[in-house]
Amino acid sequence: MGERLEAFRKFREKMNERILESDNLEIKRFFALDTRAYEAGALPVKTKELMGLVASLVLRCDDCVTYHIVRCREEGVTRPEFLEAFNVALVVGGSITIPHMRRAVATLDEVEGLS
């Protein structure tokens, strides 16, 4: 994993810990709900992570896109599968998602060691 992705992971973990140590029940519930939503169920984890990636692209959240690209790769998503997911996001979100898709491809390149 590249330096940028490692820094992203460390920052995310550190700040999640800081947020959760506040002991706010509603925040803890939301974090738990988010975690549980991506567990295996009627849909496999791989599919759920791809869905999260598409939603993140459409919502234009680059941090979320980065997180889901890493998780998708861990779940065995291939480059052709990523590109199909990017296409779904483009169709749903329109041309405004293109800058985020560019950064997503750059992140995928980094995850795959191509950059």
Image (cartoon, rainbow, N blue to C red):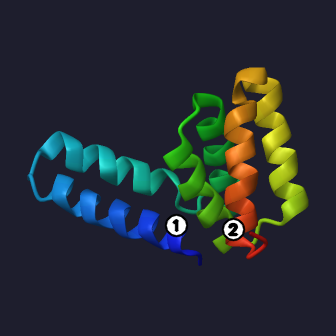
Question: Residue at horizontal 76%, vertical 32%?
Answer: 98
51 with respect to 13 (left or right): right
Q: Upstream in the sequence, badge 1 or badge 2?
A: 1
Of the 4 image quadrants, the one containing the N terminus is: bottom right
Query: Is residue 102 depicted above or below 79 in this figure?
Result: above
The residue tagged 1 is 4
Q: Give the crowd class for mark 1: few <14, some 14-19, many >=20 residues within 10 Å.
A: few
Where's residue 22, x and y in %? 9, 52
58 with respect to 3 (left or right): right
CB within 8 Å, label 1 to label 2 = yes
Question: Residue at horizontal 61%, vertical 46%?
Answer: 52
Query: Which is more toward the observer, 114 or 75?
Result: 114
Where's residue 19, x and y in %? 19, 52
Of the 4 image quadrants, the one containing the C terminus is: bottom right
Question: Residue at horizontal 68%, vertical 47%?
Answer: 103
Question: Residue at horizontal 79%, vertical 43%?
Answer: 86
Query: Is residue 55 depicted above or below 24 in this figure?
Result: above
Which amino acid type is shown beneath numbered disc 2? Glu
Residue 45 in view here: no
CA gap, disc 1 and disc 2: 9 Å
- Examine the image and state in which quarter residue 49 appears: bottom right
The residue tagged 2 is 110
Mark 1 lies on a secondary structure that is helix
44 with respect to 82 (left or right): left
Where's residue 56, x and y in %? 59, 39
> Could you tell me how many numbered marks the image carries?
2
Where's residue 33, x and y in %? 37, 48
Mark 2 lies on a secondary structure that is helix
Residue 78 in view here: yes
Which amino acid type is shown beneath numbered disc 1? Arg
**Residue pushed farthest right?**
80
